[in-house]
Image (cartoon, helix red, strand yellow):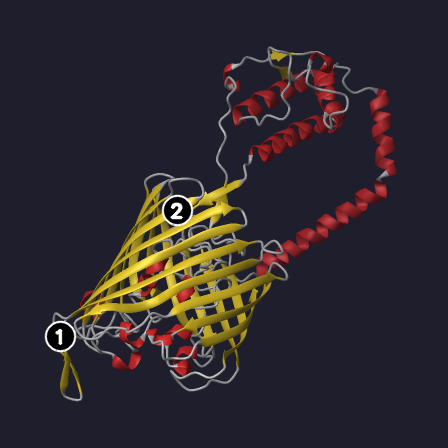
Amino acid sequence: MHKVLWRLLLISPAILISVLGVSMATIAEESPKKLQILESPIKSEDSAIEPAAVEEMPALNEPLNLDSPQIENAETPVENQEMEQVTSVSQLSDVQPTDWAFQALQNLVERYGCIAGYPDGTFRGNRAITRYEFAAGLNACLEAITQLIQPGGDFVTQEDLAILNRLLEEFQGELATLRNRIDALEARTSELEANQFSTTTKLVGEVVFAASDIIGEIDTGRNAVPTLSERVRLNFITSFTGKDSLLVRLYASNTPNLGAAAGTNMARLHPDRGNGNNFDIDLGWYNFPLGDKGNVLIEFAGGKLDDFAPSLNALDYGGAALGTISQFGQRNPIYRLSGAGVGAGATYNFSKRLGVSVGYLAGNYLSGGDPSPKRGFFNGTFGAIAQVTVQPTESIGLGLTYVRSYFTGEDVANNNVSTAGGVGSALAEKPFGDVATSLDSYGIEATWRLSPRFVLGGWVGRTEATAQNNAFSNGVRVANRGDEATILNWALTLAFPDLGKEGSLGGIVVGMPPKITNSDVAEDRDSSLHLEAFYRYQITDNIGITPGLMVILDPEHNNENKTMYVGTLRTTFTF
């Protein structure tokens, strides 16, 4: 019996070499990445969260997933070529003594006789093998070894045993040390398993510190003073099947809304929503696959329409403080025309080039679970989205978006009516005042990766607003039911991934915030221009610092207003 054990010890290198060969072939088969625009339907409001499969932290430097095309092998399929047994490694014409695996091949061929070559006398060591080929090769080696270790065989010689004993004595100290390390590792692993937070849930967090200020004098609001604020987000992500994910996020912040101080939403920075540093649940959803090509998202807290469809902006990291410094520069404002609500949606990718997303959210600072009149899931404020996303080439993406929205105008204290997504002029935000308003919005979003380090993008949005009731101010009618208004916005974005350092990001945004161009009530008289530049320097994988400047020409679409300068220095910690 002991001879069999010794023989098994001696043949273990052959099995190990076979496994290593398969591992190297598998690695060689992996391909680089390409532009993947038809992404998961959820942009989880945190780039550090991958909703459908919680195994990867999205890429701090690229909101778009990159893959490169699979290259078809032009040769005759290897599975159709019958291999022939060889007895000497010299029979393989493409194997040289200088190859790193030469000795391993020589051992497998000449000692174990279990390696086959192709009919043309080649081994093709750099070609990835299939699992079937691996199984056949491993079976051949095991059969050869089984014959060698039969009773009466001379597989193990006295010389082999002497060498093995000498090696055991020579490395006795190292083997003892290794054994102790394994024992210590097993003990630590057991302790971690016994004290871990959860077997199904992991924590992904983000902490942001920001110093911000409106520079110089303004005439749309009061002059602001410099501020230093913070935001903390703790995401608890659970997967029950490995393919689904449940997210619950705790949020606390004291970040100010500079738009309130500036007298215009055009000055809003990201982030800018404070809650008195009181932790509350501001986001919750459950995501699961629908077949091989679909995905379903159910949102029970803090949902937004862009959770259901990709915004196609390389500077948009959802709610994470890793991209643009402004609210306007994140994405087409029509994605904001629902508020933060509850609802559900789905995405279905018909192919790698074509996907369709739909979604519905109820509530805008109102609960979809409120049974009061003009509340609830269907009778209150809501937003619904439908988007077709097309990727005609590996580097170009195009989105065609339609959003249907309705604001009840019932909750004036919480700014219930928001027809410009909270980033346009005051007139565009409430074209008829605080009155029930319906919206039909249309958007075109595009992105074009010209090189790995330069992405050009942009969008155009158009909203048709209709007053659903008469509007009064101080007893005077200011709008009639059926009055209409047209709201336009556009932007051009330039993204520079890995600028200066891998993981860093530079960005430029030029655009016009939402403006009323035609109305039965009142129109914006001029056109504002939003100019933004920022650079996030990634100090480490988990720490980034972002200086940025935003310039608003003719704030509130009024050329009599002074140019506004808003600066920020933002530091983001992720863990």
Q: Picture coordinates of residue 255 (x, y %)?
A: 47, 77
Q: Is residue 198 left or right of residue 162?
A: left
Going 70% across and 26% down the picture, which residue do you hit? 14
Q: Is residue 1 left or right of residue 468?
A: right
Q: Which quadrant does the N terminus fall into?
A: top right
Question: Label 1's element?
Answer: loop
Amino acid on which the number 2 mark rests in the picture? Gly
Q: Picture coordinates of residue 317 (x, y %)?
A: 46, 59
Amino acid on which the number 1 mark rests in the picture? Asn
Identify the residue under disc 2: 397
Numbered circle sitting on residue 469: 1
Going 47% across and 70% down the picture, which residue do you hit? 550
Question: Label 2's element?
Answer: strand
Can residue 315 be seen from the camera position used here?
yes
First in sequence, mark 1 or 2: give its number: 2
Q: Residues within 10 Å of mark 2 (few under 14, many from 20)?
A: many
How many numbered discs, if any?
Answer: 2
Confirm or deny contact between disc 1 and disc 2 (CB under 8 A).
no
Q: Picture coordinates of residue 133 (x, y %)?
A: 55, 22
Q: Quadrant of residue 474?
A: bottom left
Q: Is residue 48 left or right of residue 266?
A: right
Task: State the residue lying farthest toward the bottom.
Answer: 474
